[in-house]
Amino acid sequence: MAVKYTIPYRSMDDQQWRIDISDNTHDGGTPVPIRGNGSAGVVTWVADNTDDPYSCYKSSTLTMNVIQEGQINISEFQVAQDRDYIVRQYQNGVLKWQGFLVPDGISYPLLSNPNNVTLSAICGLTMLQNIPYKHTDLQGTTSAIDYCPMNYIRDILFLNLGAYLPVRWTNLLQCTAFDNEDIFAGSVQWSVNGEGYISYQSYSNSIGSGNTDAPGPPQTCDYILKGILQSSQCTIYLADGRWNIRRINDLVRTTVPYKQIAADTGIMVINVGTQNITKQIGRYGFNFINQNALVTVKQGIKTCKTTYTANIRDNILPNGSFDYIDKDGGLFYLRYWGIYDETNHFVVASDSLDNRKGYSADLIYEGVIPNDQWFTMFTGITNPLGKNGLSIDTNTMIAYVIFGFLLEITGGGGFPLHDDGTINWDGDPLRIKVILNLGGIQWFLKKTGFWVVEDTYIPISVDKLSLNDVATVDFNAFQHILLPITPPTDKVIAGYESNIQVLFRIAEGQSYKVDNVYLSITKGNDVYESTFATSKNTTTDKRELNISSSFGGYQLSNLMTSPFNSGNECDYRDAEIYTGTLTGLTSNAIMRCMYKAMRILNTDINVRNQFWSFDSTYLIDSMGTSLFLPLNASYDTEKCQVNGLVAIEIRNDAIELTEKYYNSNDSQLSN
């Protein structure tokens, strides 16, 4: 983009400021100069939640007050699209702010010049809720494709929004599975198969098989960016020519560590440093003006309740509907599913059995006679058979399951036939197993719908089924298959064995296809309540997350390297204060800040001959050693003053809290 208009001005402390307006239509010649009319560049930050230190977005707007002398093509601005013009603000040649010109609201007198015109630009965060996410694979800190959270942040801010600026972040959380690694740019991953950023829509197929869904429209950029940041109690704002992401609890210190990457989409080069972000307001820092400083209070809370509304498909089995395949040479194989025998291998994908977009599993016996083969989920750990399945939380999240699949018998060698050509099911030629690994005990589902600890199988039969017919098998003997009651424990923790496996036997001579192998549950949400029991406050602060960590691998919005690793990767550590899921950690961290009243400063300050940045915390005269975090501010760069500064007291006290963990459907999900 070439600079089309430029607004040069000097501040009252003799700093050289300039605002450039660029677009793709300018020929690259000399920019057209525009005079300011006082307060030529005012940057305003506004938190998305009033009086909330954990506001995720602090969106900013640049207001430009200029004089139209006939040189500005105002009508061109008025008919522009949202991101046609990029606006950049510089101080002494250094970029301080960048955003997009806002066409809406621009007006001017039709017949008279000169006249005053007000233009505005926004940082773009508020646009994200209307931008569908479009994914681009990016490299991490090596040449390999990486699905770390920072790559999604880059994808959204750079490629989807078009706001290329360096990203600086402070986040000291650690995933216990990846000790001493940055959770934004290390081994923590999200949506490695692309399922997390897709919405899903239930449907009934031509065969009549229910309990399934199909990929729908993508989630919005706002859904993903807010989801990632809120799960680790972070806020984002544009200041000092960069995107700043700060974890609120990690700001309760004078000097904060940070990491920073450049505004590009290549291999991430991470620069590390420290930053003194604490400034003073009063006699030894920024001076109060107008004597209008006002202190109010936000009352403390007794409980923080955080609900994780996970993205859960109707079919919780990873790739159970066989939508996803991997290519090896000229063949396509089903992701996560394969044959278990002496030489484990993946299964060739065939056309779907229900005329939808997707695939089916073509199962043909290729074993060593007389040994059976088993078609099952491949979790990366293949031994022993029936172990290491999909992590599920049977303590609070699931009380029952619904199970079924589509079936087509394609070869009669392993399936005896009646005289009329239909399958003879005597001797149980088709057998499946559903195994629940629970607390070190293997439970096997019986055909009656109950669980036993003896190794058993479920015989499958479909009346009047002929070769190459497609049938729906709904194993739902009692409407819902109740799960065994779990051993007593306060919560499922990483390393607690609780997973489920599905196995299809392939006997000598057999050839058949299966599709849409589904395991459905009643969907519920993780809920964590953190309470300061001794408090006399009564308020409950309610938070919602749409991305987090959790034991259950079927929650597609989890931060996890695969559905089978979710149980081992769900815990995060906040220094030595708390260890648990990000949902529980959110409640705990917010309580440590908001358990008692927080003072709020409302004031105007003079910043002449001093460096001021929204990326700061404050010590305030006569208010002790407490740190105050800015929520709102309006920086008049020409007059050197900040008006309407709103800053709230923050803390990170190691208080003793009680925790309650349950499911949002507990009243329905009782055994």
Image: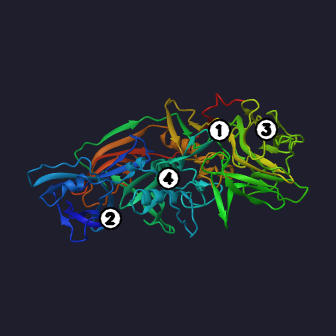
Q: Residues within 10 Å of mark 1 (few under 14, many from 20)?
A: many
In the image, residue 266 sits, relative to residue 50, either above or below, namely: below
In the image, residue 302 sits, relative to residue 310, either above or below, namely: above
Q: Amino acid at mark 2?
A: Leu
**Residue at the outermost bottom position:** 29
Q: For mark 3, what is the residue?
A: 462
Q: Amino acid at mark 3?
A: Val
Q: Nearer the viewer, residue 574 or 161?
A: 161
Q: CA distance from mark 4 to mark 3?
A: 61 Å
Nearest to N terminus: mark 4 or mark 1: 1
Nearest to N terminus: mark 3 or mark 1: 1
Q: For mark 1, what is the residue?
A: 211
Q: Position of residue 28 (x, y in %)?
A: 25, 71
Q: Amino acid at mark 1?
A: Asn
Q: Residues within 10 Å of mark 4 (few under 14, many from 20)?
A: some
Placement of the N terminus among the 4 image quadrants: bottom left
Nearest to N terminus: mark 2 or mark 3: 2
Quadrant position of residue 240: bottom left
Q: For mark 4, what is the residue?
A: 250
Quadrant position of residue 406: top right
Nearest to N terminus: mark 2 or mark 1: 2
Q: Is residue 202 left or right of residue 320?
A: left
Nearest to N terminus: mark 4 or mark 3: 4
- Numbered disc in front, either 2 or 1: 1
Q: CA distance from mark 2 to mark 3?
A: 71 Å
Q: Is residue 514 left or right of residue 60?
A: right
Placement of the C terminus among the 4 image quadrants: top right
Mark number, residue 312: none
Helix, strand or loop under label 4: helix
